[in-house]
């Protein structure tokens, strides 16, 4: 009998996903272990492998379909000896998708606006999706980069698996000037006004559909602010010694700096991990049956990617040196931006760090990454007047703010953590011991 291929649950929290691309066509032979499709979750795009052998008889869910519930049939595999007549008995219902806004939520939208294609990256994703006649395989990041640069994906050769277009191919095309034909660009510009939405009484706007990542971020942030009693503690850290030690260590990096290149954020991760080891009560989360005190210090680090935010994890960060943390963080950030993180690389974590200092942000308060109990928001280091030994001086100061779940960590415990963190940041030699 036929075998149904189901939308897999690629992580314990995954409830739906999108079919990014089919890597097998109807009629292709499939053996166990063959990569047959790419599935986009809320965090990454992952390849799924066949677990049975046969011939791909029917694709039930075309590439580009979003909001497909886990365990929904997405394709049918014919076993040996079966032909197309066996497909009639295996007809599956249409995939459930996430419901959109109810009609009562917003005023009616004119039919022309509903049928108009969205502009920007969403339009390019649809054009770049593989078809039976001519397949164009590209990662979601590559599609968005191509849209922003005005590149024609059909004119780019992919260097990824199965000829897939990846980020490096887009960057090479940008430097080589492989742009979309002028006629296509002009047509896209002339069609742009048709994509705008007009609702009586509201300003004109363009509607950008939510991807899975944005939907998940929106849901989790609302849950965090509604269910977690946040409070905030801020502390100023002088980082002149840290900056000097960082410069000295980078100059000593073997292979002309190829072995490692430390950033301020690497010191922050290391200091946070060691401070959590000193104040283990802050390395915790709330549960209905009690407070969970974690044995390991796993630091989730916020990384901005195109279309959202993800928090890859430095596992057991308190047992790793600065060079190891630095190299792991660079690898994780690169995989995050390419959509290649595995679930175990971004799920879990016991404490989070979010650093906006590189953008010049002096101070901010981060939303707790549930179910964790704390997140540390790190601002930019800037020269400020300080008083030392009764005299006015200038120092490079970095403001750090701890967002705390008051059910887990009270004010005194949060202050103890920040004091330990400040001591490590201002005396970074302690991190090298």
Image (cartoon, helix red, strand yellow):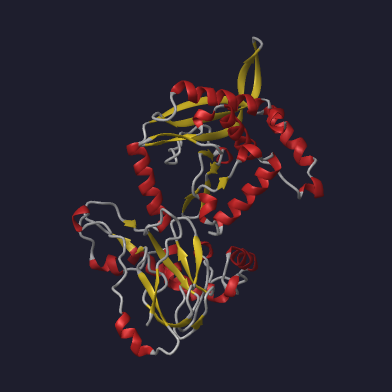
Q: Image point 20% across, 60% down: which residue?
A: 108
Q: Is residue 345 above or below residue 377?
A: below
Name the spot of residue 134 as percent of width and height, x first.
49, 81
Tell me if residue 140 can be seen: no
Tell me if residue 9 can be seen: yes
**Residue placed furthest toward the left:** 104
Name the spot of residue 336 as percent of width and height, x first.
55, 54
Name the spot of residue 240 as percent of width and height, x first.
68, 28
Q: Nearer the viewer, residue 222 or 275?
A: 275
Image quadrant in which the N terminus is located: bottom left
Q: Is residue 70 left or right of residue 148?
A: left
Give the image quarter of residue 340.
bottom right
Q: Is residue 413 left or right of residue 425?
A: left
Image quadrant in which the C terminus is located: top right
Name the spot of residue 53 as percent of width and height, x first.
49, 80
Q: Image point 53% across, 38% down: which residue?
A: 353
Q: Is residue 207 left or right of residue 184?
A: left
Q: Nearer the viewer, residue 129 or 179?
A: 129
Q: Is residue 331 above or below residue 372?
A: below
Q: Image point 45% across, 56% down: which residue?
A: 11
Q: Is residue 153 left or right of residue 98?
A: right
Q: Image point 20% across, 56% down: which residue?
A: 107
């Amino acid at each position: 009998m036929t075998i149904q291929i189901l939308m897999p649950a690629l992580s314990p929290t995954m409830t739906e996903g999108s079919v990014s691309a089919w890597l097998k066509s109807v009629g292709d032979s499939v053996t166990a272990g063959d990569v047959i499709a790419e599935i986009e979750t809320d965090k990454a795009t992952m390849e799924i492998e066949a677990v049975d052998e046969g011939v791909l008889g029917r694709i039930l869910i075309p590439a580009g379909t979003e909001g497909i519930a886990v365990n929904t049939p997405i394709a049918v595999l014919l076993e040996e000896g079966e032909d197309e007549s066996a497909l009639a008995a295996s007809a599956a219902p249409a995939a459930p998708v996430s419901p959109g806004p109810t009609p009562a939520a917003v005023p009616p939208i004119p039919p022309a606006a509903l049928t108009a294609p969205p502009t920007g990256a969403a339009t390019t994703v649809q054009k770049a999706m593989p078809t039976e006649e001519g397949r164009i395989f590209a990662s979601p990041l590559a599609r968005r980069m191509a849209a922003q640069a005005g590149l024609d994906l059909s004119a780019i050769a992919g260097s990824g698996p199965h000829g897939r277009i990846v980020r490096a191919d887009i960057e090479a095309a940008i430097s080589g000037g492989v742009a979309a034909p002028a006629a296509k660009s002009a047509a896209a510009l002339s069609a742009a006004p048709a994509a705008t939405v007009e609702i009586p009484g509201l300003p004109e706007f363009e509607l950008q559909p939510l991807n899975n990542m944005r939907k998940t971020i929106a849901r989790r942030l609302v849950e965090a602010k509604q269910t977690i009693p946040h409070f905030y503690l801020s502390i100023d850290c002088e980082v002149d010694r840290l900056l000097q030690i960082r410069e000295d260590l980078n100059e000593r990096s073997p292979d002309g700096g190829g072995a490692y290149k430390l950033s301020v954020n690497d010191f922050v991760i290391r200091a946070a991990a060691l401070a959590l080891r000193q104040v283990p009560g802050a390395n915790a989360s709330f549960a209905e049956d009690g407070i969970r005190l974690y044995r390991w210090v796993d630091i989730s680090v916020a990384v901005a990617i195109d279309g959202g935010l993800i928090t890859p994890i430095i596992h057991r960060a308190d047992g790793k040196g600065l060079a190891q943390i630095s190299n792991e963080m660079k690898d994780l950030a690169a995989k995050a931006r390419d959509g290649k993180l595995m679930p175990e690389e971004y799920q879990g974590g016991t404490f989070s760090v979010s650093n906006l200092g590189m953008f010049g942000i002096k101070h901010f308060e981060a939303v707790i990454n549930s179910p964790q109990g704390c997140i540390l928001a790190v601002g930019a280091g800037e020269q400020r007047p300080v008083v030392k030994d009764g005299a006015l001086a200038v120092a490079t100061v970095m403001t750090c703010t701890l967002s705390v779940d008051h059910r887990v960590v009270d004010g005194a415990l949060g202050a103890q953590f920040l004091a330990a963190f400040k001591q490590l940041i201002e005396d970074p030699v302690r991190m090298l011991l």
